[in-house]
Image (cartoon, rainbow, N blue to C red):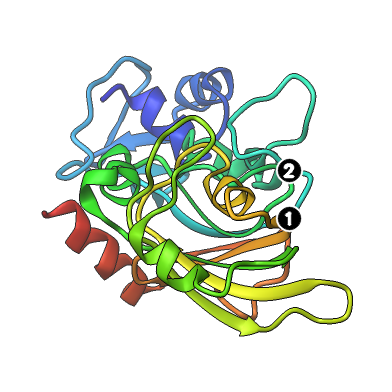
Amino acid sequence: MRLDKLLANMGVGSRKEVRQLLKAKKVTLNGKIIKDASEKVNPDKDKVCVDGEPIIYQEFIYLMLHKPPGVVSATVDAKDKTVIDLLSEQDRRFQPFPVGRLDKDTEGLLLVTNDGDLAHQLTSPKKDVPKMYRAKVKGDLPYDIVQQFAEGITLDDGYHTKPAKLKILSPKDESGISEIEIEITEGKFHQIKRMFEAVNGKVIYLKRHRMGNLELDSQLPIGTYRPLTEEELAYCFSLRAR
């Protein structure tokens, strides 16, 4: 890896600012002053310092974000604010992306990382990683809806979903709204909304609480994020090792 790339990625400054630091003889590599921005560095073996302070290289970033409604699960968008816009400039330097998608009006747990292998393990339908949501659904739901969801639901395009676990948290109230919990292992476009539409229901609120063993931190305010804990990271690394 080039020295200027490593320093820029670690938030020392822009490429231009890093070159100025090099020119000012403020950067050392294994104790030797380096002025060449293209100097090759092995992040696992070499010691890089700026003004005498060691620079610890970090390749990946793992963040738990409590996505608010109105924000899109994308890295860039011409019209709407994205989940990446919620991150600090320092964290955006890692060029992270959201793992999977939550609809614009859906809130809840979203993992943001630059680890493509982990993203694949969490989102590939072949991996059967469960995602748990809670929803408010309006309409007269079938009496056997739990069984129907357990057998899979045929969507409007003819696709038959994988089995889903459905739990009624609160039966229909006087407004015709039921509260439910649903666990799915895939993520087709607007899947949960379309599953309920297939049984004459309309999802009016949807929140994701869990992906695999990653559970939304109840103390994490909506619109904010934090790094994963050591226990959460251990789970992620176990997925990557599969």
- Measured in 3D between alpha carbons, the distance from the residue under mark 1 to the one under mark 2, in whole angstroms, is 6 Å
Image point (79%, 45%), residue name: 70
Residue furthest to the bottom in view is 170
Q: Is residue 194 left or right of residue 173?
A: left
Q: Secondary structure at mark 1?
A: loop
Residue nearest the observer in this picture, 126 or 198: 198
Q: Which mark is residue 133?
A: none
Amino acid type shown at disc 2: Val
Residue 71: which disc?
Answer: 2
- Residue 176, image quadrant: bottom right
For the question of whether residue 227 can be seen, the reply is: yes
Residue 68, label in figure: 1
Q: Are marks 1 and 2 in contact (CB under 8 Å)?
A: yes
The percent position of residue 31, horizontal first and vertical second, equals: 25, 41
User: Label 2 crowding class (10 Å Cα cut-off): few <14, some 14-19, many 20+?
Assistant: many
Give above or below for 139 relative to 51. below
x, y percent for residue 11: 53, 40
Q: Quadrant of residue 233?
A: bottom left
